[in-house]
Image (tube, helix red, strand yellow):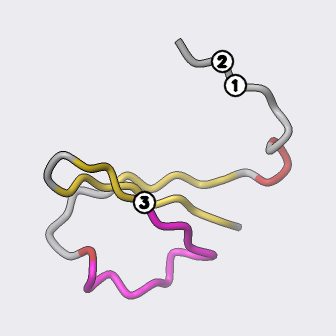
Amino acid sequence: MQYLITWIEGEEVCYRFVGDLNFDPSALEGKNLIITKIDEDNSQEEYVTH
């Protein structure tokens, strides 16, 4: 399973892909994180943005 971790630093949006949630969180300490599980079975779905 793969996860996308997203956070904001100043005015920039940063992200990191991780293979599992057992990563070293010390580099991201004190940040508000958004963790999204990437479902590999639905990777071919089409997404519409507005």
Which residue sits at x=50%, y=83%?
22
Q: Which residue is mark 1?
A: 47
22 relative position to 9: left or right: right
- Three-letter code for the amino acid on which mark 3 is drawn: Tyr
What is the x, y in percent for residue 42? 81, 42
Q: Is residue 9 magenta?
A: no
Check residue 13 in the rendering and tell me which mark sits there, or answer none.
none
Dot 1: element: loop
**Mark 2 vs 3: CB contact within 8 A:** no
Front in this rendered view, residue 39 or 8? 8
39 relative position to 8: left or right: right
* Circle 3 crowding by C-alpha within 10 Å: few under 14, some 14–19, many from 20: some
Magenta range is 15-27
Q: Which residue is mark 3?
A: 15
- Three-letter code for the amino acid on which mark 1 is drawn: Tyr
Disc nearer the start of the sequence (3/1): 3
- Three-letter code for the amino acid on which mark 2 is drawn: Val
* Circle 2 crowding by C-alpha within 10 Å: few under 14, some 14–19, many from 20: few
Kindly report the distance in space between the C-alpha atoms of the residues bearing marks 3 and 1.
20 Å
Dot 2: element: loop
Q: Establish if 42 lies above or below 20.
A: above
Disc nearer the start of the sequence (2/3): 3
Check residue 48 in the rendering and tell me which mark sits there, or answer none.
2
What is the x, y in percent for residue 18? 56, 73
Where, by quadrant of the figure, is residue 19 drawn? bottom right
What is the x, y in percent for residue 38? 66, 53
**Mark 2 vs 1: CB contact within 8 A:** yes
Kindly report the distance in space between the C-alpha atoms of the residues bearing marks 2 and 1.
4 Å
Dot 3: element: strand
Kindly report the distance in space between the C-alpha atoms of the residues bearing marks 2 and 3.
21 Å
What is the x, y in percent for residue 29? 20, 76
